[in-house]
Amino acid sequence: MRVHFKKSYDEDIRLFEDGRRLAKYAVLLAVMILLPFVLSEYLVGEITLVLIYCVAGMGLMILAGHTGQVSLGHAAFMAMGAFSNLWFMEQGLNFLIALPLAAIFTGVVGAVIALPILRLSGIYLAIATLALSVIVEDIAIIAEPFTGGVMGVFAPVIEFFGLSIDRYGAPRAFYWMCLAVVVLVTLGYANLLRSATGRSFLAVRDSEVSARALGVNVTRTKALAFGLSCAVTGLAGALYAHFVQIVNYESFLILLSINLVLLVVIGGLGSIHGAFFGAIVVGLLPQFIAIVRDFLQANAGIDISAYPGLDTTVFAAIIIAIVIYEPLGLYGFYMKLKTQWQLFPLARRDMFRRSKTYLKTERMR
């Protein structure tokens, strides 16, 4: 097992633990940049959708994974980011200006909404955010001058630096643009967690009483986390609008919010890596099931399509299995395998046995 001995506080807070880890991420980034040259346009499009899910997952991870606040309405903030970005572009603003403006607008709206909503907690907060998602769906229909009403809004071609980027006309360029956004958001997120603000998020998540005792303004911290979460989710919404080309209220239904919650739970709450693992599962698993369905129909004569909803049932069963048998998500499972490999042959079978948990009322007896 490799142990890194830290000799200064700078080593303790720097972004990459050592040169090996930096090299690993550099190789991974190089592979991601080269992928469009070896994959078909269809697969490039599917991976682009995964990248957009990664941004949305990191947005929700800030709130749910690192601040401990549950939200079932983040599709509403994706809608805000999408419609505001398209409206800014309709006013003649360049995409490079419209994209951050959409994120800022969504973040400010989210922070304002957070002030009354975050007085709630637990299931009540989840219900409030779910109601917010329903309200935004109705607003998207009523605010026709901005959202196109029922018909929706068509996303224009992205143009900057003399380049024209279109989801279908230039899928490789669109992929690289989404990859650049993912890298920037990931670096910003990682640096946020190293700051005093990020540590206050973790303190509020672990214990609000202890956080107050340490001088953390819990209300302001929650509102800031909600605003940042909404801003990042708004970025994902803007990219999603250009990915699907045309958006209306049906593009951001409650089901999308549930998918985002599943994304962070499956990937692993409380880790940036979990957002990526979850995005891969939520983005690619339905396509994998569809490929298996077509394979069985072509080679084994088994027609799954004759049973409506069966592929959705399989998808749900896989998710339930992950949640039951690996509560820490796929990233937690990966870390367990990594630790066992490093400790081999000293690793014990029950070294990751779950500790017994209690309800709050039981702890206070």
Image (spheres, rainbow, N blue to C red):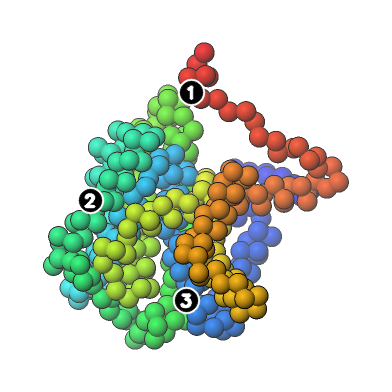
Q: Which numbered tag is attached to residue 360?
A: 1
Q: Which numbered tag is attached to residue 135?
A: 2
Give the Cα separation between the discs numbered 1 and 3. 46 Å
Q: Earlier in the sequence, mark 3 or mark 2?
A: 3
Which residue occupies 33% across, 70% down? 241
The type of residue carrying mark 2 is Ile
Q: Which residue is mark 3?
A: 45
Please provide percent x and percent y for residue 70: 40, 42
Q: Give the SS element for disc 3.
A: helix
Comparing marks 3 and 2, which lies closer to the viewer? 2
Which residue occupies 78% across, 51% down? 341
Please provide percent x and percent y for residue 180: 46, 70
The one nearer the camera, 84 or 17, is 84
Q: Which numbered tag is attached to residue 59?
A: none
Please provide percent x and percent y for residue 137: 24, 56
Q: Give the SS element for disc 2.
A: helix
